[in-house]
């Protein structure tokens, strides 16, 4: 799209905007190679939702404050509303859709959220789950304070965070017990 603006009486002040160009992006989405087209200025959150159909990635504040759009980029939690889709080219992106074990079986973190009533309206839940996934990979045996500190990057108006903290601590405890059982069976 080109736009030209003229000032009065023949003096021309021109602003030329480059034509929008479509760019190809190839990424690994939840373990599957996916391709799509985007504009150079398109956000990763919009690309995931509208081009690739990963609608579990929610868009709240569009300023990186609320955390609803959190995904994992190469295994690390990131706000998809602060990243251009082009920046994801060639990278691994994991969204809440990839947390389930199968179409019929939730992952352990998702099950704990349900068990502890750690979700209400569900709008923020996808982003919180992704941050919790990253957090538990980095901090496998957290205490309540560490979980609350991690959650401070998310805004949730429904749960009061206490059930979320309980769910994360429950999963950490279960994973530690499972890890000890595996170690004992190999001895």
Image: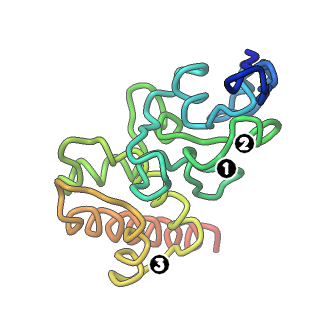
Q: Residue at x 71, y 51 (%)?
A: 74
All told, the count of numbered labels is 3
Q: Residue at x 43, y 39 (%)?
A: 59
Q: In terms of sequence position, does the residue under pointer 3 or pointer 2 come before the other?
A: 2
Q: In terms of sequence position, does the residue under pointer 1 or pointer 2 come before the other?
A: 1
Q: Which dot marks residue 141?
A: 3
Does residue 186 lie above or below 83 as drawn?
below
Q: Which dot marks residue 73?
A: 1
Q: CA distance from mark 3 to mark 2?
A: 26 Å
Q: Camera-side residue: 51 or 182?
A: 51
Within 10 Å of disc 3 (Cα), the crowding (few <14, some 14-19, many 20+) is some
Looking at the image, residue 126 sits to the left or right of residue 158; the answer is right
Residue 93, image x, y percentages: 66, 41
Q: CA distance from mark 1 to mark 2?
A: 6 Å
Looking at the image, residue 79 sits to the left or right of residue 29; the answer is left
Q: Which residue is mark 2?
A: 92
Q: Residue at x 43, y 59 (%)?
A: 65
Contact (CB < 8 A) between labels 1 and 2? yes
Residue extending farthest front: 9
Q: CA distance from mark 1 to mark 3?
A: 23 Å
Does residue 109 lie above or below 22 as drawn?
below
């Amino acid at each position: 799209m080109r736009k030209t603006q003229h000032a009065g009486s023949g003096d021309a002040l021109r602003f030329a905007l480059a034509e929008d160009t479509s760019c190809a992006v190839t990424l690994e989405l939840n373990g599957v190679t996916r391709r799509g087209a985007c504009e150079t200025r398109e956000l990763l959150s919009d690309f995931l939702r509208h081009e690739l159909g990963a609608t579990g990635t929610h868009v709240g504040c569009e300023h990186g404050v609320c955390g609803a759009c959190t995904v994992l980029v190469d295994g690390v939690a990131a706000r998809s509303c602060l990243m251009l889709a082009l920046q994801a080219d060639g990278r691994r992106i994991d969204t809440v859709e990839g947390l389930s074990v199968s179409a019929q079986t939730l992952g352990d973190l998702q099950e704990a959220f349900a068990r502890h009533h750690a979700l209400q309206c569900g709008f923020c839940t996808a982003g919180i789950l992704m941050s919790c996934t990253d957090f538990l990979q980095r901090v496998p045996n957290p205490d309540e304070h560490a979980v609350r500190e991690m959650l401070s990057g998310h805004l949730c108006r429904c749960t009061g965070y206490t059930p979320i903290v309980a769910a994360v601590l429950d999963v950490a405890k279960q994973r530690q017990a499972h890890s000890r059982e595996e170690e004992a069976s190999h001895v």
